Image: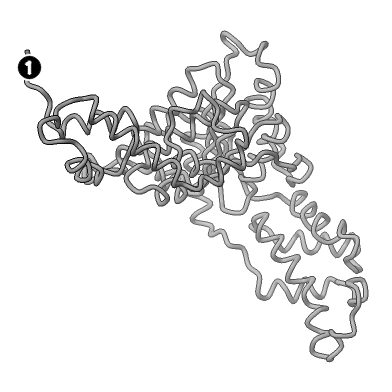
Amino acid sequence: MGEEPTLQEEFERLFSVFQISTKSVLQEAIGYIPSKKRGRHADIGEFVGKKRKITENSLSLSNIKKHFPKGIPDELAHLRPELLDQVMPVFDHKTNVTWDAIAGLEEAKEKIKECIVWPMLHPHLFRGVLTPSKGFLFFGPPGTGKTLIAKAIANECKAKFFNITASDLTSKMHGDTEKLVTTLFEVARHLQPSIIFIDEIDALLSKRTATEADSPMLRMKSEFLTQLEGVSSKDDRVYFIGATNKPQNIDEAARRRMHNRLFIPLPDASARRMIIEQEILEDKECNQNLSKEDLKWVVGNTKGFSGADMALLCKEAAYKPVRQMQLLGKLDNIKARPEFDAITLEHFKEALKTRKSSVSESDLEDLKKWNRLFGTISSK
């Protein structure tokens, strides 16, 4: 027979079984368990069990109570409550974004519908050789609508939407990040159909280096790669979408697991016009006097602008009449927005003096080059 495990060894085993992370419990247990019985599993198990119950009762677990008012489902009972509570804030019950809200990007939309929407809505048809890939990478300049597209997918498919950034995973539970990743995917499976969307994925799954050996970050990356592999190999309706404007920084193993890598480009002329119409013309309270020729001029002078840049330009132009009223000392007399002077082409010309494109030519060329190497949609 082997030697009886020490108290330290037995606690390490039970920490795993009961999923308790506070190792200061060990010191507390020395005084709890009589010295002659420190090797007895029952006594140690009793203590650890009581400690876990006390820990659970002391947590507020407000996020769990909000999303699971009847209590944690049996399928998730094995997860640590504090980790589950950390995951729930990134879960959106419902998104209301429609495809019409996304200007342009027709090629990307069609590819996404083909690869995600159809299989999620008709899983009985997409089997065998038609089994869908479930790992996606949206890459392109910042402000081009990557998050909006992910929300539109979730809305179209009536899927649960998990919207998370790299910092959410790496900062909330120091030392437990890999377990938080596991919890995220298990909750998504329980609530499927689900979309897990992670912005800044390059910060989370950057290229592995020798300096990371046996570090929490490396363990987190390894767990993430394992979960991505599991998403692709199972029949679950769980899709993963990562977004980045620096795809060249992503680890090769992560890139391979995101089988569909879709370039989300800057808006073309028709998309830029659509953004102006959405921001200005479709705002019923917005007083404007813009002709078709005026819109054509603005569109022609905003080449290289992202969707976010265009929205900010419209906001800046809309502010010009407001500032004019303030300078004249009449702002306090305005009772409703339609009383402001109409937005004109001159206001856009003034706005363009301060609002510029946020995307550099060199960054855009780097993205196009990466797309030619690894992308699913060709650059134009």
**Which residue is depicted at the point 51% across and 23% down?**
75
Q: Position of residue 1 (x, y in %)?
A: 6, 12
Secondary structure under tag 1 reads loop
**Which residue is depicted at the point 63% across and 13% down?**
126
What quarter of the picture does the C terminus occupy? top right
Answer left or right for 237 relative to 227. Answer: right
Q: Extreme top residue here? A: 128
Q: Which residue is mark 1?
A: 2
Q: Position of residue 130 (x, y in %)?
A: 60, 13
Answer left or right for 35 relative to 281. Answer: left
* Amino acid bearing label 1: Gly
In this picture, is 72 found above or below 83?
above
How many circles with numbers are drawn on the protein? 1
**Which residue is depicted at the point 63% across and 67% down?**
356
**Which residue is depicted at the point 64% across and 57% down?**
304
In this picture, is 171 found above or below 228?
below
